[in-house]
Image (spheres, rainbow, N blue to C red):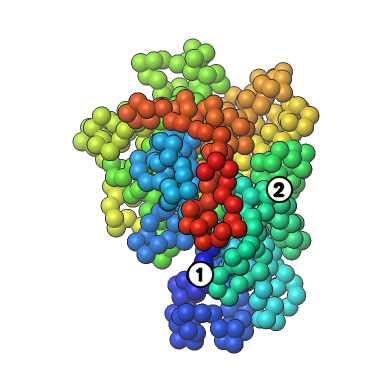
Amino acid sequence: MKNIIYFLLLSCMMACSSDFLDKDPLDKVSGKNFWRSEEDVKLALTGCYALLSAQSDNNSISEGFGAFTMYWDGISDDAWPRSGSFNSIATSQLEPTTGGIVNDMYYLNYKAIATCNYFLANVDKAKLNATTTAQYKAQVYFLRAYYYSQLCKTYGGVIITLQPEELNYPQDMKKSTKEQVVEQVLKDIDTALVSLPDDVYSGKIVKATALGLKARVLLYNERWAEAAAAAKQIIDGGKFRIADEFYGLFVKPGQNNNPEIIFSARYQLPNLINTIDYQMGWDQWERIQPIKGLADAFECKDGKKITESPLYDPAHPYDNRDARLRRTIYVPGDPWKYSAEGIFDPAKDGNNRTGFLVKKYLDTTRAPTDYSTRSDQDFVLIRYADILLMYAEAKNEVSGPDQSVYDAVNAVRGRKSVQQPPLPEGLSQDQMRERIRQERRVEFALEGLRYFDLLRWKTAATVLPAVVNPGGVNRKFFPKNYVFPFPQAEVDSYLSLEQNDDY
């Protein structure tokens, strides 16, 4: 947590305004020269948003929470990570010294939290009218809640700090319990809800964004009735709906003014770019590769598993399947104009180890790609389909599968470009639970939710060891892995920070 207070704020301000460089010193934000106008407040607010889509000097996709999303699927049962710290975790080498994501999730979240704390402590100095100030604060309260929720779902209990510090956090700060962190997150969300606009999402946080995060946090902590109530507020509000086209949710221009997107990490050419097209596809790095288990999870068009459907043909295993399959991943034989044969053949792809490639989030108009490719897909962090399935899951746990549960799940399955049959009537609570979990897997594949779903369902210790990595070695998952370890350097620096159990 050392020396992080001004990092994001400064980098954002320097990136957003060349004039700023002529006004203020580069090593600190001067209270005397800043917080004078609404433009200053807007620059500081942009700094609070920055970690959602921040990038390093070499445009690495490893920075920014939006860009993290697909990597989490690499340590689930849906994909394999070709290299890096996620590969270490997938091969059961998750330790305090693993580095990479173990460090990034910790330090980057605290950098963002520090920026939010600084904003909240100083924004009143700009002396804007009370309503305007409250609306700016509401966005930052939400963002602080989001960053703490990221820490909590990854590490469990963490240090809570709500005040800016000049240099370093006090050495004697102790971590709070997971329950205390959750309550702080919910408190910030409720504070934000008072002043957020009840509007559609256009890049800035709205009331539905905060309610969506609230539903997710409550769901992850098995507070079923409260989670269902938060999700239902969005449903009843009527401002969002299931988008007709599934693939369009993940590339532009389909993302522009999309009625399903509630919260996203935003990119915009020419200045704010990501490298997902180069990192994930087109015979380049292919850092995340879907595995056969994910492909097999997609039902046939009649709504039956491939082991039960007369539509399933082993000679053509990917025909007659849920339309989301080929909008999510490339399967062998798919049209693929970037090879001489015009089809995707993993046997002729030197980087491919699983037989499948990512399609979700890849923009085919930019292929073939190289280091110069400039991509601007937004990474979707909360969307309306998740609201519906969170509502269905929570409501089912409270009172079983009533009509509202069926309606929510069937709305996702009935998307115009998907049109999977409605769920069969008469499901028990247990059967509905399994159907909802199945629906989440195929709907949100490669969106970074699957790994955390396995953790919260307490099924990771059963599901993940059954996954076979390329090369024939099964993954491992130990009880301690339900939370990440704190970075070893952080434990060494803060002797009062107690390492998570068994690490």
Distance Cα–Cα, label 2 vs label 1: 28 Å
Residue 440: x and y in percent read: 58, 34
**Marker count (numbered):** 2
Does 49 sit left or right of 424 as displayed?
left
Q: Secondary structure at mark 2?
A: helix
Q: Name the one closer to the observer, 161 or 371.
A: 161
In the structure shown, which secondary structural element does the residue marked by tag 1 occupy?
Answer: loop
Which label was assigned to residue 317? none
> Does residue 169 appear left or right of residue 132 in this picture?
left
Q: Mark 1 highlights which residue?
A: 3
- For marks 2 and 1, the one nearer the N-term is 1
**Dot 2: few (<14), some (14–19), or many (≥20) neighbours within 10 Å?**
few
Rendered location of residue 60, percent (x, y): 38, 56
Residue 461 lies in quadrant: top right
Q: Name the residue tied to disc 2.
A: 179
On the image, the x and y values in percent for residue 276 come to 39, 50
Q: Quadrant of residue 196?
A: bottom right
Residue 182 visible in the shown view? no
The image shows residue 467, relative to residue 165, as above or below, that is above
Task: Establish if 354 lies above or below 252.
Answer: above
Horizontal and vertical percent position of residue 357: 36, 36
* Kind of residue sitting beneath label 1: Asn
Looking at this view, name the residue that lies furthest to the front. Answer: 495
Instruction: Please tell me whether residue 441 is drawn above or below residue 26 in the rendered image.
Output: above
Task: Mark 1: give few (<14), some (14-19) or many (20+) Cα within 10 Å.
Answer: few
The answer to whether residue 236 is above or below residue 57 is: above
